[in-house]
Image (cartoon, grey):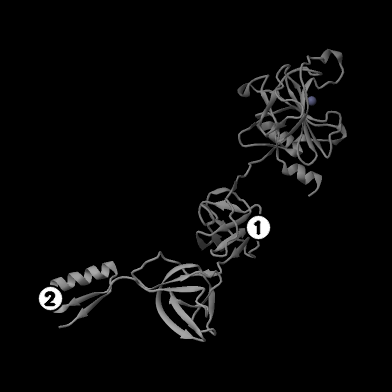
Amino acid sequence: MGARERALALHLRYPLNFVAFSRGFTSSHRGVDIAWNDAHGGPNMPIYAPADGTVVIAKDGMGNTYSSGIPDWGNYVKIKHADGVYTLSAHMLKGSVCVSNGQYVKRGQQIGRMGNTGYSNGCHDHYEVYVGGSGTEYRVNPVDYTYAYPDQDVHPGDEKEYGIKRYTPVKEVGNPVPRNPMVDQIEVLATTLRARKEPNLKGDVLGYVKPGIYNIYGEQEADGYKWYKPDDFWCANDKEETWIKVMRSEYVGSPVPRNEKVDQIEVTATTLRARKDPNLQGEVFGFVSPGYYNCTDRAEADGYKWFKAEDFWCAQSPNGDWVHWLPQKDPRYEITLMQITEDQRKEVEAYARAQNIVYVVKEV
Ligand SMILES: [Zn+2]
């Protein structure tokens, strides 16, 4: 980006909340004169910083010197912004300058009030913008670099006559997280990816998605795009899939809580392969997410003990590591059929099912 592009990217904000010009930028007047307005504080309207920056000159205490005929800014504030951009507001009301040399100011922070000091024949703000340096030779037409924000009023006639530009700042949304190969994630690469309330192009735009990595909580296809839900918003990948990089989980399996009433395994290795079949030639689905699983089958093959959980098999290391066999610990009840009625037997069965208890029926 050149100096001009960087200056434009600052999105300088007009220093007054009513934007109406009494004089434009010319070869002999290297700034714009902004007029006062009754609805916004009258002749001594507050003047605000056009962007974040450091005050390089804050001058106060001067009176009106118009009769002298010598050009003079009177009381003024000059601010150094990023990227070699400076702004200046002149002829401020005596005693109104509320910032000092070296002070850091935020965009929209009040710096003083409109006045009629120095070489001025009426209350106005003489506003200048400098691009590339602080010397007067760097002054540019403020209209080209300054924007009216949504909360600022613009004189309708001046908007056309002077080409006053408008700008609506866009919020950044989202809280990126670290890379986690255990879950499906996306990495937002684009810096101007829209975050929408709904997964379609008609949805409300909540702001731009802050670049970074996010867990995916939803996926959908709509309007010809693939949509992802990283936080409480949706965003779409472009057709070439350059805005969003999709990073699938390399892990399979959903561990369950420990339950001593069923046969379980505990996977402790973090790189245990999940295979379709209980042998080393079987297809690999990915790594098994560590944790407890209900075990539904066992096998021995290729010199390993194999355990089945969900729809995959995994092998124990020859010395008993990686995955541990945890057989159920529940007592087994012995029931003698002759001792109970049919109703009682049904009751026992229902209770055993509900409690996951294994019992043995002993016939006499
Ligand atoms: Zn002027």
From the viewer's perspective, is the residue at label 1 or at label 2 nearer? 2
| Distance (Cα) linking label 1 and label 2 | 72 Å
Name the residue type under label 1: Leu
Using a 10 Å C-alpha cutoff, classify the residue at mark 1 as few (fewer than 14 neighbours), some (14 to 19) or many (20 or more).
some
First in residue order: circle 1 vs circle 2: 1
Q: Which residue is mark 2?
A: 339
Question: Is 284 located above or below residue 72 in the figure?
Answer: below
Q: Nearer the viewer, residue 89 or 342?
A: 342
Q: How busy is the neighbourhood of tag 2: few (under 14 within 10 Å), some, or many (20 plus)?
A: few
From the top left corner, tell me how far across and down residue 58 is, in percent: 77, 24
Q: Position of residue 204 (x, y in %)?
A: 53, 49
x and y percentages locating residue 89 in the rendered image: 75, 27
Amino acid, disc 2: Gln
Q: Is residue 3 above or below residue 302?
A: above
Query: To which residue does mark 1 refer?
Result: 189
Quadrant of the drawing holding the C terminus: bottom left
Q: Residue extending furthest bottom?
A: 302
**Under tag 1, what secondary structure?**
loop
x and y, in percent, of residue 320 in the image: 50, 76
